[in-house]
Amino acid sequence: MAKPILRVENVYKKFKDTEVLKGLSLTVYEGEVVVIIGPSGTGKSTLLRCINRLTEPDSGDIYLEEQKIEPGKSNLSYIRQQIGMVFQDFNLFNHLTALQNVAVGPIKVKKMEKNKAMELAMKELERVGMAEKAGNYPAELSGGQKQRVAIARALAMDPKIMLFDEPTSALDPELIGEVLEVMKDLANAGMTMMVVSHEMGFAREAADRIVFLEDGVVAEMGSPEKIFNNPEKERTREFISKIARLNNGCKDQEVL
């Protein structure tokens, strides 16, 4: 049986008077791809940010393998290196080339020799199909290309788990596919992944488990077949139906 890589136990988070996470618990296992879906404002992105302490939860515990992730602890920087995160808006350094953007983490954080870091960076760019753009600056890249560089940058730190926060939401429709293909390749290679996404085609094909969040808790979870074809709860069924209508060209503000 696969070992747990990440454990989230009874996590709460409030912003002013709004309670976003309400005792959420979830375990992710080695090699598993977990796709998190749910209405806007239900805590999906907040969950990912709490995992690596970009946002500090109010209470609850989070473990990477058996190490508790806590603020102010000497191991926090090391643990963050083991959790790759890909954001909606790329967050690349505009004054650095694609190659330099990928190499900067190993150089600055892992204290890797520059030539070795550059070799590693090129390897990761090749992995995401961006080797030919290694010398280009972000301003010279499309949105999909920027996101692939951002994925390569996270991979260069050799993480135990990758977190994706709606990685295609800022992309034009014709660019979404190239990013999803990279993510599918990572899934097929056995990378442990948590993905917040409304890309249901990706969820059907790549996910081992789908988690439906609503009102700050796990409302339902199961295999793609179960969640898409035979959900236990009517609310899950309604949400999947709304997503399907959105993908067919209808607008629904709840899931945007």
Image (spheres, rainbow, N blue to C red):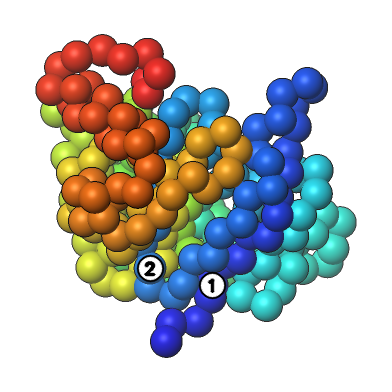
Give residue 97's mark. Answer: none
The residue located at (27%, 25%) in the rendering is: 242
> Disc 1 marks which residue?
5
Q: Secondary structure at mark 2?
A: loop
Q: Are marks 1 and 2 in contact (CB under 8 Å)?
A: yes
Please, what is the three-letter code of the amino acid marked with disc 1?
Answer: Ile
The reply to whether residue 231 is in sight is yes
Please, what is the three-letter code of the amino acid marked with disc 2?
Answer: Glu
The residue located at (18%, 44%) in the rendering is: 201
Q: Residues within 10 Å of mark 2 (few under 14, many from 20)?
A: many
Q: Quadrant of the C terminus?
A: top left
Q: Is residue 19 above or below residue 44?
A: above
Q: Is residue 230 above or below residue 96?
A: below
Give the x, y percent position of residue 250.
19, 14
The residue located at (40%, 18%) in the rendering is: 254
Give the x, y percent position of residue 71.
82, 54
The reply to whether residue 135 is in sight is no
Locate residue 62: give its quadrant: bottom right
Give the x, y percent position of residue 10.
70, 55
Is 117 or 41 nearer to us in this picture? 41
Q: Secondary structure at mark 1?
A: strand
> Disc 2 marks which residue?
32
Locate residue 72: give its quadrant: bottom right
In the rendered view, does 11 fall on the left or right side of 123?
Answer: right
Q: Quadrant of the N terminus?
A: bottom left
In the rendered view, does 76 fall on the left or right side of 42?
Answer: right
